[in-house]
Amino acid sequence: MAAADILEKIPALDRSLTSIEAVVDPARKKAEIAQLQQEVSAPDLWDDQENAQRVTSKLSRLQAEVERVEKLRQRLDDLGVLVELAEEEGDSASLAEAERESAKLSDDIEALEVRTLLSGEYDERDAMVTIRSEAGGVDAADFAQMLLRMYLRWAERHSYPSEVYDTSYAEEAGIKSATFTIREQYAYGMLSVEQGTHRLVRISPFDNQGRRQTSFAGVEVLPVTEEADHIDIPEADIRVDVFRSSGPGGQSVNTTDSAVRITHLPTGIVVSCQNEKSQLQNKAAALRVLQSRLLEKARRDREAEMNALKGDGGNSWGSQMRSYVLHPYQMVKDLRTDYEVGNPDAVFDGDIDGFLDAGIRWRRRADAE
């Protein structure tokens, strides 16, 4: 790419970044940061742990938002200087570096632009994801495991920390269910558009007659709870059962009863965790999952009340949201946004950013209507 071509892209990148800055408003956020820093420096801050948690979390979030925008602005300014110097000195290596930075900067600005669309109540939280095999027998269990790997690979690609809480293996292959967290700011907002039923069409590797099989897996995405969420769970409201952890094919992976299953008696919600080494750790992890499920239930109850008042009769989101077709052709298509790609292997290897971006933009338009 010639220097002139790169310089031609800079004004468009500048316009996009300027629109992001207008939404983020770094100047206003810096004023908030200064106020919060005064609160954090108060010697009695941790006398009220709930307020301290709220203040420090908000300070960290605002600082990260401002830093992200300012770094992009600095990179854009540096790009223009780099191109001009490369052109003046005829430096092909610097020009190639500028070309790479131009492409990377374009991707990063677009990603941040999508993130500015995340303004829901819990969008900035970490995400807790549960995948369950549905109709389709062993193919559905195998598909659920493919989706688990897909999301963990997506997190790995972006260097987002992840933690698997519980995996329930199917008898022949795959998994019945799995629950994991992605710990990254706005992970819930990004992944919430993945919630729904996913469908796989392929020649079944488990059918000795080589017939085509359609199978289904469900994806649930919840915001991770924080200390200030006030989800009170009295001991009398839960039943705790312990059991031996199991691996693929039902084999025992632990010689002690360290796995924990918690039943919330008032709602019937059941959660479990078996991936930690001790019963105490598994109980703590299971309680975190239960907290998130109860938080989401409270949110949905409030939403249902509002929908009833508005008279729209319920949620406008459809259940089945994406098809993965491996036979007779290769395609992955989102049924809400019509976004599609022809490389399922890349998608199953974690390349789902295009689907997330399209889903976030679709939801924003749907909310505006």
Image (tube, rainbow, N blue to C red):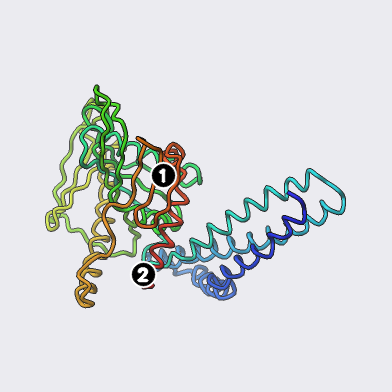
Q: Residue furthest bottom?
A: 309
Residue at position x 59%, y 74% from top? 27
Which percent across, then down, holds residue 90? 86, 48
**Label 1 secondary element:** strand
Q: Amino acid at mark 2?
A: Asp
Q: Quadrant of the C terminus?
A: bottom left
Which percent across, then down, holds residue 249? 23, 26
From what the image shows, is residue 102 above or below residue 214? below
Residue 288 visible, this angle: no
Which percent across, then down, holds residue 278? 28, 37
Quarter of the image holding residue 54?
bottom left
From what the image shows, is residue 163 above or below residue 291? above
Residue 305 visible, this angle: yes
Q: Amino acid at mark 1?
A: Ser
Q: Nearer the viewer, residue 11 or 282?
A: 11
CB under 8 Å between callouts 2 and 1? no
Q: Residue furthest top?
A: 208
Q: Which disc number belongs to residue 367?
A: 2
Q: Which residue is mark 1?
A: 162
Gap between marks 2 and 1 measured at Cα:
30 Å
Q: Nearer the viewer, residue 39 or 265?
A: 265
Residue at position x 30%, y 27% from top? 205
Give neighbour class at mark 2: few <14, some 14-19, many 20+ (Cα, 10 Å): few
Number of labels in the image equals 2
First in sequence, mark 2 or 1: give its number. 1
Q: Nearer the viewer, residue 77 or 262?
A: 77
**Label 2 secondary element:** helix
Camera-side mark, 2 or 1? 2
Residue 105 vs residue 188: left or right?
Answer: right
Q: Residue furthest front?
A: 328
Residue at position x 44%, y 62% from top? 361
